[in-house]
Image: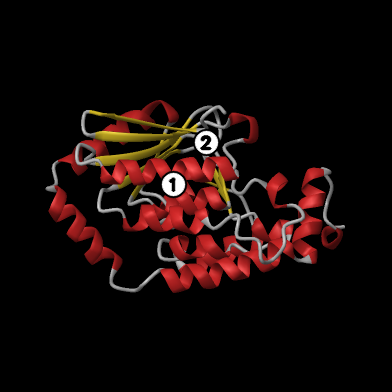
Amino acid sequence: MTELVHLDVAGGVATITLDSPRNRNALSAQLRRELLAHLDTAIADEAARVIVLTHTERVFCSGMDLTEARGAAASDQGVAEFPAILERIWTSPTPVLARVAGPARAGGVGLVAACDVAVVAEDATFAFSEVRIGVVPAVISVTVLPRLLPRAAHELFLTGETFDGHRAARIGLVNSAVPGFDLDAEVTRHVEMLRLGAPGALAATKELLRGDAPLDARFAEMQQLSARFFAGEEGQEGMRAFAEKRKPRWAQ
């Protein structure tokens, strides 16, 4: 089986690369398993001072793999790895930086928000597209809502509108948006600043920034809400419409 997520550790940097271009780096079961495993490996590696989450090809991450979600039951626990992935990034004692050169949608935006630092190309696009296919941005809300300005969160969660890197920076989703040809230099600049911090001090500072609110209960609650809508009538119709390249019934 071809690996969909790669891990490389060099010069104190653990680079985790999403590499599933056939489905625009969608969060398939295989990709989720491999991403979680590589995160665990990178976090446990004392040689890794910074973790960089990046991607091949044009798209950062298109969200959940809808071909796997169609026909899912509300009790299906097959996507349980996704909350674990967000929690692992959010609570990692090692700083995690997202390098985003292309579009991120739904769960992909949740990944970006979970990272400590996010650097994006100015023409990268983002959208909370869930409501347009009849589901709820529930699980990702745990990492996204602490980042976003409240007015922007209401607008973008409810409309599903697409926005660019500059707006993502203005509303707090990302740290900086730069021309594509400057992206790697901007990533390197942040990586080098993070490497100046003492590992123990960085870990303790991350804990301070998170506060002491437990995530387990919130993720469990949001997982149930998400599963209910993925399995529900609107969600299944929305995913069928997406696959058939037509508008769902409520938008006709």
Give the distance between the C-alpha atoms of the residues marked 2 and 1, in whole angstroms: 22 Å
Dot 2 falls on a residue whose secondary structure is: loop
**Which is closer to the viewer, label 2 or label 1?**
1
Residue 147, image quadrant:
bottom left
Which image quarter is the C terminus in?
bottom right
The image's colouring method is secondary structure
Q: Whole-percent x and y of residue 139?
A: 53, 63
Task: Give the residue pinned by disc 1.
Answer: 36
Q: Could you tell which of marks 2 and 1 lies nearer the N-terminus?
A: 1
Task: Give the residue pinned by disc 2.
Answer: 102
Amino acid identity at mark 2: Gly
Q: Whole-percent x and y of residue 75?
A: 66, 66
Amino acid identity at mark 1: Leu
Q: Is residue 86 above or below residue 61?
A: below
The crowd level at tag 1 (other Cα within 10 Å; few <14, some 14-19, many 20+) is some
In this rendering, would 233 be left or right of 60?
right
Dot 1 falls on a residue whose secondary structure is: helix
